[in-house]
Every structure is written in C-alpha cells, then in structure tokens.
Amino acid sequence: MKINSLTLLLLVLLTCFPAFAQDNFPEPTPTPTPTESAASAKPANSQSGGTFSRLGIFSAEINLGVFSPKGDLRQSGLFENAFSLGFNGGLTPPKLRQLQIDFGVDVAFEGLTGRRDIPVAPGLGLRVNDAQTFPYAGARLYLTPRKSKVLVSVGGGGALGTYNEYISTGDYGPNLDCTVCESRWGTGGYAMGQIRYRFENGLGIGLTTKYYSIRTSGFGFSNVLGRRSSDQWLGVMFTFSFN
C-alpha cells in the first residue's frame, strides 16, 4: 500500500507540473527575421526621406516665348523680337533643398530684321534663316518652400551667345553651304526669375523671365553692327515643368 500510494502521488505531481510551468513561464515572443524587420522599416524610411534621393532630384523644363533685343542690338536696328524655345535641366542637392543647379539652352529664331533671299534663278531664291543660341549653366534659389504648390525662384550664371545665318532646303533637309551668311559669338551671363504652380503629379506650369548680357564679336551683319558689341536679350516665356 505504501508503494502504491507513493506511485500515485508521483503521477499526480507529474500531471500538474506542465500546467504550472505554462502559467508561470510564458512562451517568449518570436524574434522577427531580418527580412521582416527590413520590410517593416521600409515604409518609415521612405516616408522620412521624402522624395529626395541620395543624388538629389532631377527636373526638366520646356520654355516657349519671345526674346526682345536690347543694348547695341536694339540701336543697330538689325534685330527684332524673336520666337524662342528653351530646355532646362535642374538638379537639387539632397541637403540643399532650396538650391537648384541649372543647365540648358535657349534658341531664338528669325531675330534678324534683314531677312533676305539668295537668287538662284529668275524669280527663284533660297531663303536665308537665322538663329540665336544661348547655352548656359548656373543656379537658382527658391524663395518659397519646395513643398509649396506655388514656387518662386531667382538665379543666374554664365552663358554663351551665337548668331548664325544659314540656308535650309526644308524642315527635314540638310543645310546648304552659304558663302554670304554671317555669324557672331561671345560670352557673358544671364539672370532669371520664375513663378510656377506645381500639381500633385509633379507637372507644373508657370512664367519665366530671363535676361542675357553677351559680349560678342564677328561679322558686322552688313557692316551695321560693330566688330564687337554688347548685346542684351530679354525673354518672357511660358514654362512647363516635369519632376
């Protein structure tokens, strides 16, 4: 009887021990795997980083408008208002959100008043066209926060200026050699100001003003313009931006 009672007591204790251990020592919380940790942290990191990457933000602009000659060009009477087309690329450094590095080109078409034809046969001539090209590089400063819908910015930098006459056989044809065509070029700078409205999808529309001051030299265009001249152009353009 003593052995049977002891055996019975041991069986009862062994049966109750798992329940006791479970109540007093709860299971540890499973440790998330590195993949799960990275997945859960990814939304927070992307949210805190905003839209700026390590290399910054690249944006592009297309400008359509009119350039008006100033300075020696206006006094010479050789130049007039010209239709312009421009392309601008911008890079915003990740730690300087109010600053943007700009580079691009503006082209003004048919700015010379002395449009003329080169006769090749009785009653037939080839039209002499012209273009003023201004490659530039500089920077702009945003006066409003970059997260605003309305963006106001000012800036400036260095620029080149070239004036070229040429003969084209058509919209898609090659240019012909022109022995009477003239050209000039020089260096200088530009200043700009812009106001732009940005939509939720990153597209934007606005108005840009730009002022070029170029010191050029070359042919005098019918000996009216000096060998060297101080040329200014003032442009007003509609801007279409893409982020």
Image: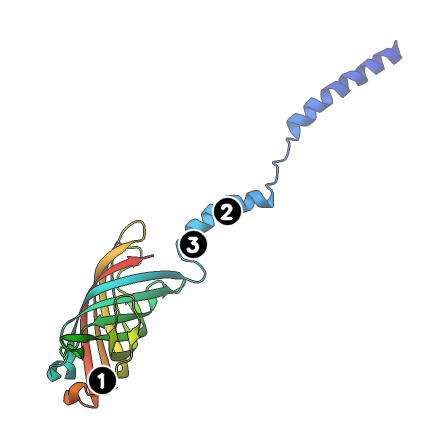
> From the viewer's perspective, is the residue at label 3 or at label 1 nearer?
1
Residue 222 in the image, given as x and y percentages of width and height: 16, 87
Residue 153 in the image, given as x and y percentages of width and height: 25, 65
In the shown orientation, is residue 76 left or right of residue 101?
left
**Mark 3 and mark 2: Cα distance apart in space:** 12 Å
Q: How crowded is mark 1: few (under 14 residues within 10 Å), some or many (20 or more)?
A: few
Q: Which mark is residue 41?
A: 2
Per the image, label 1 sits on a secondary structure element best described as loop
The quadrant in which the C terminus is found is bottom left
Q: How crowded is mark 3: few (under 14 residues within 10 Å), some or many (20 or more)?
A: few
Tell me the residue that label 1 is attached to.
Answer: 180
**Above or below for 237 versus 3:** below
Tell me the residue that label 3 is attached to.
Answer: 49
**Which badge, 3 or 2, comes first in the chain's sequence?**
2
Q: Residue 123 carries which label?
A: none
Residue 19 in the image, given as x and y percentages of width and height: 68, 22
